[in-house]
Image (cartoon, coloured by chain):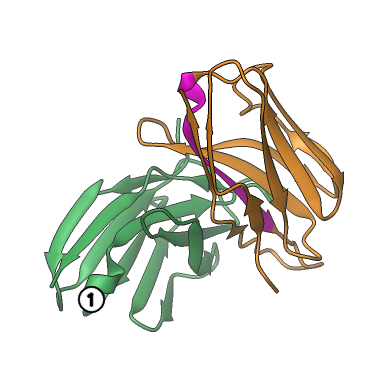
């Protein structure tokens, strides 16, 4: 089964609203990463949070990590139509190069 | 750097034909990954290499699939013979684990969209 599972599978909001996506995982991790995929493109790394960190910010992105609950959330504030994409969490339980990707959340931001 | 380069970007072939997908990782990266993405199954890791050596090929669906990395700047994923159910987008990604670091961001190529008729 997937190590990372995103919730919700799909999210539709209006421009200017905040978007929150959640990720749950099963095993201990070294870090958790979030990626974005625009339609027809490869995945692009957004942000990484280490297992000893609880919160991290990057521009309009805010990531939280709760290792006791084995969960993470990605918040995109003041969303824009250009944020429309699929968002994936990826965990690193193997202390190496391999990442385990979730199924993704499809975000649609309507202008 | 040009990023991860994949070719071809699109491939349409007939069932039973051999298909070869190519990947050039980012220079200096020591990990290379092959993924397959479909609507039904999502993003699946097929195989990955470390320093040109295959580490985990447990995601390779069957013997029709094979992957090689003859040197640090080139890898191929071959499907022989191809079947309609192999239709998908195939991504190559690379990463580098800096000595003493714990992060392993992956850089993805643009993908190859394969259609097997």
Residue B74 position (above or below residue A17)? above
| Residue B19 % position (x, y) | 65, 30
Q: Which residue lies most toward the bottom here? A: A59
Q: Position of residue B28 (x, y in %)?
A: 81, 65
Q: Where is residue A54 in the image (x, y as percent from the top left)?
A: 44, 70
Q: Is residue B88 left or right of residue B76?
A: left
Is residue A97 one of those drawn in magenta?
no
* Depth order, front residue of B68/A74: B68
Q: Which of B51 and B20 is in front in this view?
A: B20
Q: Quadrant of the N terminus of chain A?
A: top left
Q: Is the magenta stretch mostly helix, strand or loop?
A: strand
* Quarter of the figure that contains the C terminus of chain A: bottom left
Q: In which quarter of the image is residue B16?
A: top right
Tell me, what hue is chain A?
Answer: green
Magenta stretch bounds? B84-94
| Residue at numbered disc 1 | A80
Task: Describe residue A109's horizontal placement relative to residue A29 as left or right.
Answer: left
| Chain in orange (letter) | B
Q: Residue A78 location in percent, x, y?
A: 21, 80
Residue at x 55% of width, y 67% of height: A52
Q: Going 36% across and 52% down the picture, which residue do you hit?
A: A23
Can residue A111 be seen from the camera position used here? yes
Label 1: chain letter: A
């Amino acid at each position: 089964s997937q190590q990372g599972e995103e919730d919700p599978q799909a999210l539709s909001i209006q421009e200017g609203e905040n978007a929150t996506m959640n990720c749950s995982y099963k095993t201990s991790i070294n870090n958790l990463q979030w990626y974005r995929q625009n339609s027809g493109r490869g995945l692009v790394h957004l942000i990484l949070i280490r297992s000893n960190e609880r919160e991290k910010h990057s521009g309009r992105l805010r990531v939280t990590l709760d290792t006791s609950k084995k969960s993470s959330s990605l918040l995109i504030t003041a969303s824009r139509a250009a944020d429309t994409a699929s968002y994936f969490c990826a965990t690193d339980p193997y202390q190496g190069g391999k990442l385990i990707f979730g199924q993704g959340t499809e975000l649609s931001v309507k202008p | 750097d040009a990023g991860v380069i994949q070719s071809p970007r699109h491939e349409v072939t007939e069932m039973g034909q051999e298909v070869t997908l190519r990947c050039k990782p980012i220079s200096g990266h020591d990990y290379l990954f092959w993924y397959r993405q479909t609507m039904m199954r999502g993003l699946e890791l097929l195989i990955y290499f470390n320093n040109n050596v295959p580490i985990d090929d447990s995601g390779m669906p069957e013997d029709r699939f094979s992957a090689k990395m003859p040197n640090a700047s080139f890898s191929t994923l071959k499907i022989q013979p191809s079947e309609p159910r192999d239709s998908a987008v195939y991504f190559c990604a690379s990463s580098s684990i800096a000595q003493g670091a714990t992060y392993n961001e992956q850089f993805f190529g643009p993908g190859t969209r394969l259609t097997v008729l």
